[in-house]
Amino acid sequence: MPGGSSHPHHKKDTVQRSGLVWGVDRGHKTERRVPRAKPSNRKGRSSQSKAVVKSVVREVAGFAPYERRAMELIRNSKDKRARKFIKRRIGTLRRAKGKMEYLTNVIAEQRRAGH
């Protein structure tokens, strides 16, 4: 069916039934079922305890050698070179962009703490 769902009797989630036997919103007045939240929808979301553990590990272990070199490149305003360098080390440009953002924030934080 063009411009809609594949089946003519399927209603969209936003439709409120009117209780009438004719019209676009025809049908018995019904209440939308709200499904319970699935644990799989939480995947990847950081909890408070995980964030604390990550920060402690980062504090103790420090930065990886490639991260230190990337930070040096960023400090010398060679952002593109740093991004390409990180991409080679961790695999994808998307991850590299995230790491760049993180390292840039770390450098800014260090500057604030230093002054």
Image: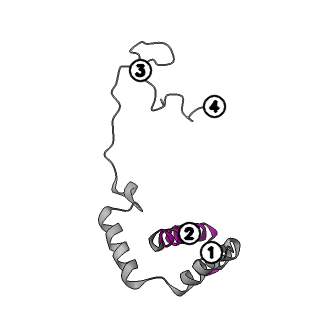
Query: Is the Cβ of the residue at disc 4 closer than 8 Å to that at disc 2?
Result: no
Please tell me which residue is depicted at 52% across the width and 67% down the height of the picture: 105
Q: In which quarter of the image is residue 17?
A: top left
Tag 2: amino acid: Thr
Q: Which circle, 4 or 2, is nearer the viewer?
A: 2
Towards the viewer: 38 or 84? 84
Marks 1 and 4, Cα distance to the nearest angstrom?
Answer: 49 Å
Circles 2 and 1: CB atoms closer than 8 Å: yes
Label 3: which secondary element: loop
The residue that label 4 is drawn on is 3
Q: What stretch is highlighted in magenta?
A: 88-112
97 part of magenta stretch: yes
Q: Which of marks 2 and 1 is nearer the N terminus?
A: 1
Asked whether 50 falls inside the magenta stretch, the response is no
- Residue under numbered circle 1: 74
Question: What amino acid type should be assigned to the residue bearing mark 1?
Answer: Ile
Name the residue type under label 4: Gly
Tag 3 or tag 4, which sits nearer the N-term? 4
Marks 3/1: CA–CA distance: 58 Å
Task: Give the mark, 3 or 1, whose residue is nearer the N terminus.
Answer: 3
Residue shown at 33% from the left, 38% from the top: 34
* Residue 51: image location, x then y, percent: 35, 67
Label located before the other in sequence (4 or 2): 4
Q: Nearer the viewer, mark 3 or mark 1?
A: 1
Q: Is residue 52 above or below residue 45?
A: below
Q: Which mark is residue 104?
A: 2
Q: At numbered mark 1, what does the secondary structure look like: helix, strand or loop?
A: helix
Mark 3, residue position: 17
